[in-house]
Amino acid sequence: MKPESFQNSLIKYLAELYGNPVKILYLGPINKKEASSEGLKEFGYGKTLLVEFEVNGEFKSLVLSSMTENIFGHQHFSDRAQALLLAHSCFNKLPKHVRSVDVGAFTKRGMISLGDAEEFFIVTEKVEGQLYYLDLERLKSTRMLTKLDEDRVNVLADYLASIHKVKGGDPSLYVRRIRDLIGHGECLMGLTDSYPPNLDFTTLDELKEIEKKCVDYRYKIKFKTSRLCQVHGDFHPWNILFREGVDFTVIDRSRGEWGEAADDLASITINYLFYALQSEGRVKGPFLKLFNLFWDRYLNATGDEEILTVIAPFYAWRGLVVASPIWYPKLENTIRRKIFTFIHNILESDRLTLKDVPSMFEEVEG
């Protein structure tokens, strides 16, 4: 889409949204250092843009995002529309989540009408902060654990404990969430389908074996419907923004309001294990301390020991994410194999024993 056409459509859309004329002050990448001196050269679906404008003498700053077509269950226009409509309906219901302002559509005539929509977009408020993964990158480099590292783990564990206390009322949503864990394009089978054939660290037969084990696990846990609770759904270090100290905001809530608490626990804690492997070659050191601290804090706050009996397929899914040759193309194959060993070991266990986690990444000799 040509920049002039896009900007004119955006001005009209914002004027209708706020009920008054608007003046665009900036339109471009969120990181202004990446902005071209020539301004926006083009707009394509899948881009994320920062929009700064003035309306009624008031300065406002919004982020406009659309989704890129991809193999993780987003091939169809309707897939992407569903994801963004669901996101808009859920974002503002979760404490500390960035606020969604609106959801709309690009059409042949501009932005708004849904009848001839070509693509959907979402508009959120802009929040300041640094992504949490930068803390993990710094710790990987320095191997020096700070009090702030521990304080941030504690506040994140407390946050999950607090949102998970809100229970859902429709048991069918729990069954669906467990089914989606296995079969959704964004989840386990979407990940296995994204692994190219003829890899040198795994085979299609191994991926098929993991899928089968997860289907078996689904029948162990899908009727635990009393566990249905409020969730984030994609609670990882790239969806958490910290400001000073322990002040944070979360972004990109996924796949609905209700689900299984283990989803969020696996999503965040797999990253402490993953960074330990990258830093130490094994699960040990400061990242293992953060992993244990997170779990201790969460279990002390919730008393939810049952979560240890349902988390295995969620860890399997997240393990496939961090071992992925698409998401992490430069990862050493020795680390990928350790992650696959963990996936097999955890799926063969009826209950996770936290003290055994480091050894679950190691092949048994003999």
Image (cartoon, rainbow, N blue to C red):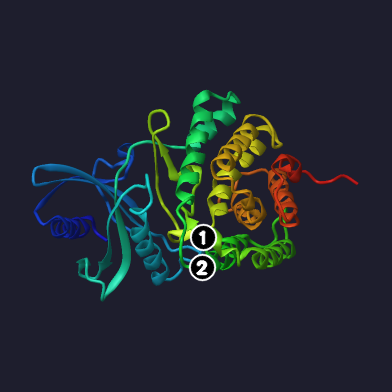
Residue on which the image places disc 2? 171
* Quarter-of-image position of residue 79: bottom left
Q: What residue type is labelled 2?
A: Pro
Secondary structure, mark 2, is helix
Position of 106 relative to 202 (above/below)? below
Q: Where is residue 260 in the image (x, y as percent from the top left)?
A: 54, 57
* 3D distance between C-alphas at marks 1 and 2: 7 Å
* Quarter-of-image position of residue 60: top left
Residue at (22% x, 58% y) in the render: 6
Q: Residues within 10 Å of mark 1 (few under 14, many from 20)?
A: many
Q: Position of residue 91 (x, y in %)?
A: 36, 54
Q: Which of 202 and 85 is in front in this view?
A: 85
Q: Which of 252 and 278 is in front in this view?
A: 252
Q: Label 2 near label 1: C-beta < 8 Å?
A: yes
Residue at (51% x, 64% y) in the render: 71
Q: What residue type is labelled 1?
A: Leu
